[in-house]
Image (cartoon, rainbow, N blue to C red):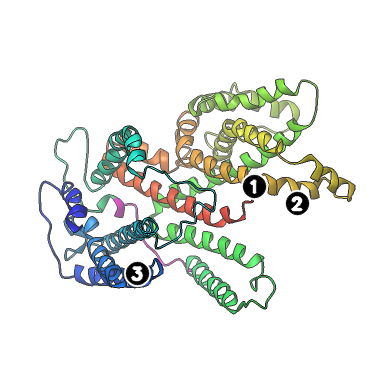
């Protein structure tokens, strides 16, 4: 098992050196092995599997997990004289990799317990299914798709990880190994009091929730935790994560990270609110509604660069129609967005919202058609006003669609907004609209530093994974799929 895990990693070893073992690695490996042993001893009996086998497997996985990081890096983060930021970053990546590996092994153990009949498969009770022929035939049918994914997705991802540890330029044939230097250049950790206070507040809120839930007994009706406390804890946790990330990054990349948050939040929140409002108006029975519904959805067919070009023309300070309308209808003059950072961000958000508006309207229109009319009529007879019907009937019924749109809009805001920025503001003025995607593309395309761009792409990937996981954990639980 150990050789199967390490051999693919050895293929990524730097050509200009081998793996070096340092004494400072031993505490980390001992800790991860102990944690793996504990996980095996606790989880395997719950799966009705052999406790000793679980302990051995957990200890082996816990000790091998860090090697998936330290072997490709030649143990460079543990070399004497290394930057402490590089050391702790390497430890963090190794621990996270080990945790993911342990989670995968636990999942495989659970599947084995189900196959052996030791554990009941609850997925069938929840509407899942099973293949009568076993996993061989499905895997054979999926083989062409998996081959395409390996060649065009997974292997480039592995190559991106390799490039992130090197200085790679088109004009230079050599690719010197720099360990995690491409990452640490973007970091400058500092003790932010706001981040510390928010982190402590989140820990306290979590402790209160855990204690109150443990005190709940079968004789207590309902949950002992107030309904608002988990939501407040989630907001505090999100704010703490953002401030901690800002505290870790350097000044230059802090601005890029903050710009990404502003543009993404503005695009998602405004886009969903406008999409729901316009969809509600378009849902009303009016003559010719099919025609204007088609026109409302039309902007979705426009690519992000074209949206950037359109708004570039609309807000042009000399010939743009927006400036002429403001001057004709008001005594004021529209500022030049190319020199005003706040206005530049607003224009980028406006263009991005316009681009995604048709997509949001389309799904909200489909969702509104599934809301039962008899429930709405009953609430109207009971005296509920329009806002009450929207809040207590329509919004809960649309929660699955809203959850889906939040995830897809966040994905668009993180990755596809680059085309709009490139044509509309080119990252200016003074970097006010340079988000993480634009920064990494500029690092590779303009500066020619593919190693730095690869490092930034991995940071962006980690950010997207964290935001998506937080979204599924916080919002996904409140989504109602009831009939």
The residue tagged 2 is 392
Q: Earlier in the sequence, mark 3 or mark 1?
A: 3
Marks 2 and 3: CB-CB under 8 Å?
A: no
For label 2, count other residues whose C-alpha is less than 10 Å away and answer few (under 14), some (14-19) or many (20+). Answer: few
Marking on residue 399: 1
Q: Which residues are magenta?
A: 183-193
346 relative to 307, above or below: below
Q: Which residue does the image show at 61% across and 45% down from the upper left?
A: 400
> Alpha-carbon distance for marks 2 and 3?
43 Å
13 relative to 58, above or below: above
User: Tag count in the figure?
Assistant: 3
**Closer to the camera in the image, 255 or 132:** 132
Marks 3 and 1: CB-CB under 8 Å?
A: no
Q: Earlier in the sequence, mark 2 or mark 3?
A: 3
92 relative to 155, above or below: below
Q: Which residue does the image show at 35% across and 68% down from the upper left?
A: 44
Tell me, yes or no, if residue 446 can be seen here. no
Q: Is residue 406 left or right of residue 28?
A: right
């Amino acid at each position: 098992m150990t050789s199967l895990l390490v051999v693919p990693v050895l293929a990524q070893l730097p050509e200009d050196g081998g793996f070096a073992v340092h004494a400072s690695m031993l505490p980390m490996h001992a800790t991860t092995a102990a944690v793996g042993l504990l996980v095996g001893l606790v989880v395997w009996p719950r799966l009705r599997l052999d406790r000793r086998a679980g302990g051995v497997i957990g200890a082996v996985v816990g000790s091998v997990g860090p090697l998936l990081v330290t072997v490709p890096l030649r143990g460079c983060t543990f070399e004497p004289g290394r930057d402490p930021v590089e050391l702790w970053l390497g430890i963090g990546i190794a621990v996270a990799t080990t945790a993911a590996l342990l989670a995968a092994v636990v999942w495989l153990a659970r599947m084995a317990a189900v196959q052996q009949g030791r554990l009941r498969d609850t997925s069938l009770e929840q509407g899942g299914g099973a293949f009568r022929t076993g996993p061989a035939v499905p895997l054979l049918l999926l083989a062409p798709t998996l081959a395409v994914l390996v060649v065009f997705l997974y292997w480039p991802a592995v190559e991106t990880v390799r490039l992130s540890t090197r200085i790679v330029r088109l004009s230079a044939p050599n690719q010197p190994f720099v360990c995690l230097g491409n990452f640490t250049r973007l970091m400058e950790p500092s003790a932010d009091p706001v981040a510390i206070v928010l982190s402590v507040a989140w820990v306290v809120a979590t402790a209160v929730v855990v204690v109150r839930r443990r005190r709940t007994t079968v004789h207590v009706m309902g949950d002992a935790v107030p309904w608002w406390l988990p939501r407040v804890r989630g907001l505090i946790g999100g704010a703490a994560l953002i401030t901690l990330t800002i505290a870790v990054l350097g000044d230059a990349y802090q601005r890029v990270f903050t710009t990404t948050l502003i543009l993404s939040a503005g695009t998602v929140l405004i886009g969903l609110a406008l999409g729901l409002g316009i969809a509600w108006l378009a849902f009303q029975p009016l003559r010719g509604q099919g025609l204007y519904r088609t026109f409302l959805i039309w902007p979705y067919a426009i690519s992000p660069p074209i949206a950037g070009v359109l708004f570039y023309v609309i807000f042009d300070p000399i010939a743009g129609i927006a400036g002429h309308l403001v001057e004709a209808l008001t005594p004021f003059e529209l500022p030049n967005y190319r020199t005003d950072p706040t206005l530049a961000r607003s224009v980028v958000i406006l263009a991005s919202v316009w681009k995604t508006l048709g997509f949001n309207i389309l799904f909200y229109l489909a969702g509104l058609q599934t809301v039962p009319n008899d429930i709405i009529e009953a609430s109207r007879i009971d005296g509920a006003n329009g806002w009450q019907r929207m809040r207590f009937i329509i919004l809960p019924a649309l929660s699955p669609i809203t959850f889906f749109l939040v995830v897809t809009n966040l994905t668009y805001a993180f990755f596809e907004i680059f085309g709009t920025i490139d044509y509309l503001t080119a990252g200016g003025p003074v970097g006010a609209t340079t988000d993480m995607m634009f920064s990494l593309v500029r690092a590779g395309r303009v500066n020619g530093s593919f190693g730095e761009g690869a490092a930034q792409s991995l940071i962006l990937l980690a950010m997207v994974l964290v935001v998506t996981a937080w979204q599924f954990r916080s919002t996904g639980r409140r989504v109602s799929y009831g009939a």
